[in-house]
Image (cartoon, rainbow, N blue to C red):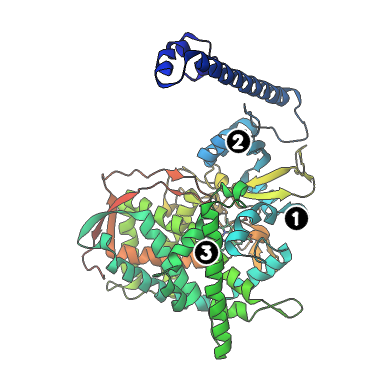
């Protein structure tokens, strides 16, 4: 009876008096305590009532015609935080139907303007540096985790140079070396993990994919020496770093709470491991290595300024963490989708047999050009399950929205949600259906971008200082973002995901435990969305399994 408790002079409360008398002091004392409580209760209720009334009146009486419509909400500060947080894609869809492509909602007291669709993505992601700013939003979360002077703890021009350095190690030549490394890691993981022992079994797949992702990424990107440390203490330290990314830290990043203390200790310890390695490598007088750390150690900022050791260390942390959540969640979704569509898993197996040979030889980077369905699996999974559902920017100068009367003021935050156009029927027929074959040109479900070939080559390209990137201005499909903050890990992620996929497909058949075609829901509680857990699937070894 929550309502009754706000109004204590009701029979319900008095009927409880007998109980109070038994456990408490004299009745008169309890009455006076009760009086104080009820006065506080009445005061709080009245305050809330007035606040809600003013908030509602304001929304009806003081509409600003040159600002996007505001999503109706009862409570000030809280605004739409809860409905947004529970299911952001549904929130975007429902409010887009009510208010159009551009609308504002209150997120933890902040006016947050969403602009969806290709025009919205372009407006926000390709916004000019004087108009929009990412670091102001993200730095509170990322700087304590990555460390100082990198990514969002430096001017954007410096980040552009850092992205250029990081990209040097993400070349075709490097990918050729990574495919066998990743294959071996996956194979050895599947051989030694108890959950995959025997002929068949049931496994909660997301934790396994998280481990496979960190082992493959750390080995490929950071070398064997660092990879081996993940079997010891590094995995725990990265886990503690990870906890720094909880959304609550947007507000409490500074607080001396246990998880923040562990985050700070982990940051110092991991950075020291990298810095010690750098010193040893310099002392050895090593030459000609090709790994990322080596490239970063030997890069120079404009004006021939070498990259300080602590920045190299912090970039190493940033690179590993940037990829971990997104690749781990994507690989879990791939496995869950395959379990819901065993027919597609067979198509993948047949694609490998047909194009690589019945003996399924060790994978090479070149093989992926012959496995278009494997690439389509990654594409289609990212279309429905892009791990980053909201991309935010601070507004630095009032921004007129072309073709409308709106001007976004500087006290708003902008939010791009490329997932909305990726699931929009006008671009993707039967948008909610996971159908990797739709990426084939002749498929009746082919997206308009495939059919009308508004493809990457026609797309406008731009160089922000780390190589040419597509502006993606017309594309409804941008799981890797666009503009100056666009992902540099796309090719690595795609090599990593396709290799993991190919190895699993050649060894296992998956299906849902109940044999259905259902797929588990999405967990939006952390910054990156991922499957709800536990997410169990049934696996069975193939005949001729190579493990
Ligand atoms: C940026 C998605 C994997 C490194 C981004 C952005 C998106 C994204 C949407 C833009 C963020 C923004 O505009 O605020 C993904 C997805 C991945 C993935 C879906 C995998 C499926 C990786 C990997 C790496 C990586 C493996 C590293 C090897 C980065 C970096 C940025 C970035 C350095 C730039 C941040 C900036 O400039 O502000 N990613 N990413 N990502 N990603 Fe990825």
Q: Which residue is at a point 44% across and 63% down the rendered structure image? A: 236
Mark 1 CB lies closer than 8 A to ligand 1: no
Q: Is residue 472 above or below residue 26?
A: below
Assess disc 3: are there few (<14), some (14-19) or many (≥20) residues with their C-alpha within 10 Å of its C-alpha.
many
Q: Which of the 4 image quarters holds residue 410?
A: top right
Q: Say what secondary structure mark 2 lies in.
A: helix
Q: Say what secondary structure mark 1 lies in.
A: loop
From the image, tell me which residue sits under label 1. 128
User: Foreground residue, 82 or 278?
Assistant: 278
From the image, tell me which residue sits under label 2. 96
Location of residue 287 in the rendering, given as x and y in whole percent from the top left corner: 56, 89
Q: Is residue 398 above or below residue 54?
A: below
Give the left or right position of residue 104, taking residue 206 as reference: right
From the image, tell me which residue sits under label 3. 266
> What is the CA distance from the residue labelled 3 to the residue labelled 1?
36 Å
Q: Which residue is at a point 43% across and 68% down the rendered structure image? A: 233
């Amino acid at each position: 009876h929550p309502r009754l408790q706000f109004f204590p002079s009701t029979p319900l409360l008095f009927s409880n008096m007998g109980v109070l008398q038994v456990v408490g002091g004299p009745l008169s004392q309890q009455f006076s305590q009760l009086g104080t409580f009820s006065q506080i209760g009445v005061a709080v209720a009245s305050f809330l009532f007035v606040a809600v009334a003013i908030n509602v009146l304001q929304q009806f009486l003081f509409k600003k015609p040159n600002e996007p419509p505001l999503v109706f909400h009862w409570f000030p500060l809280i605004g739409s935080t809860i409905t947004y947080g529970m299911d952001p894609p549904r929130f975007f869809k429902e409010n887009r139907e009510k208010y159009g492509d551009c609308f504002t909602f209150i997120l933890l007291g902040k006016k947050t303007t969403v602009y969806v669709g290709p025009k919205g993505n372009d407006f926000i992601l390709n916004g000019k540096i004087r108009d929009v700013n990412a670091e102001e939003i993200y730095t509170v979360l990322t700087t304590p985790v990555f460390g100082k002077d990198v990514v969002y703890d430096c001017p954007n021009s410096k980040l552009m140079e850092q992205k250029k350095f990081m990209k040097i190690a993400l070349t075709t030549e490097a990918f050729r070396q990574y495919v066998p490394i990743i294959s071996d890691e996956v194979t050895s993981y599947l051989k030694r993990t108890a959950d995959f022992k025997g002929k068949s079994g049931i496994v909660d797949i997301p934790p396994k994919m998280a481990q496979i992702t960190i082992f493959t990424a750390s080995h490929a990107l950071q070398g064997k020496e660092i990879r081996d440390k993940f079997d010891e203490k590094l995995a725990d330290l990265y886990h503690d770093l990870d906890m720094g990314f909880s959304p609550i830290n947007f507000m409490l990043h500074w607080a001396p709470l246990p998880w923040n203390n562990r985050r700070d200790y982990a940051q110092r310890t991991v950075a020291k491991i990298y810095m010690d390695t750098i010193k040893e490598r310099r002392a050895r007088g090593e030459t000609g290595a090709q790994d990322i750390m080596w490239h970063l150690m030997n890069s120079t900022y404009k004006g021939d300024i070498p990259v300080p050791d602590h920045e190299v260390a912090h970039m190493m942390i940033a690179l590993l963490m940037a990829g971990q959540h997104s690749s781990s969640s994507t690989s879990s979704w791939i496995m869950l989708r395959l379990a819901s569509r065993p027919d597609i898993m067979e198509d993948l197996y047949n694609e490998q047999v047909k194009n690589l040979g019945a003996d399924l030889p060790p994978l090479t980077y070149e093989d992926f050009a012959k496995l278009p369905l494997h690439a389509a699996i990654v594409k289609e999974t990212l279309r429905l399950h892009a791990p980053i559902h909201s991309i935010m920017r601070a507004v630095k100068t009032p921004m007129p929205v072309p073709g409308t009367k709106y001007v976004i003021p500087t006290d708003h935050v902008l939010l791009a949600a490329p997932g909305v156009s990726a699931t929009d029927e006008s671009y993707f027929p039967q948008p909610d259906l996971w159908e990797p074959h739709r990426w084939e040109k002749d498929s009746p479900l082919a997206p308009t971008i495939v059919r009308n070939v508004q493809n990457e080559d026609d797309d406008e390209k731009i160089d922000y200082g780390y190589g040419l990137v597509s502006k993606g201005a017309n594309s409804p499909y941008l799981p890797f973002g666009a503009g100056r903050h666009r992902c540099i890990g796309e090719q690595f992620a795609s090599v990593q995901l396709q290799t993991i996929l190919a190895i699993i497909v050649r060894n296992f058949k998956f299906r849902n435990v109940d044999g259905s075609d259902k797929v588990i829901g999405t967990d939006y509680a952390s910054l990156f969305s991922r499957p709800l857990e536990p997410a169990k699937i049934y696996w069975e070894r193939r005949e001729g399994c190579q493990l």
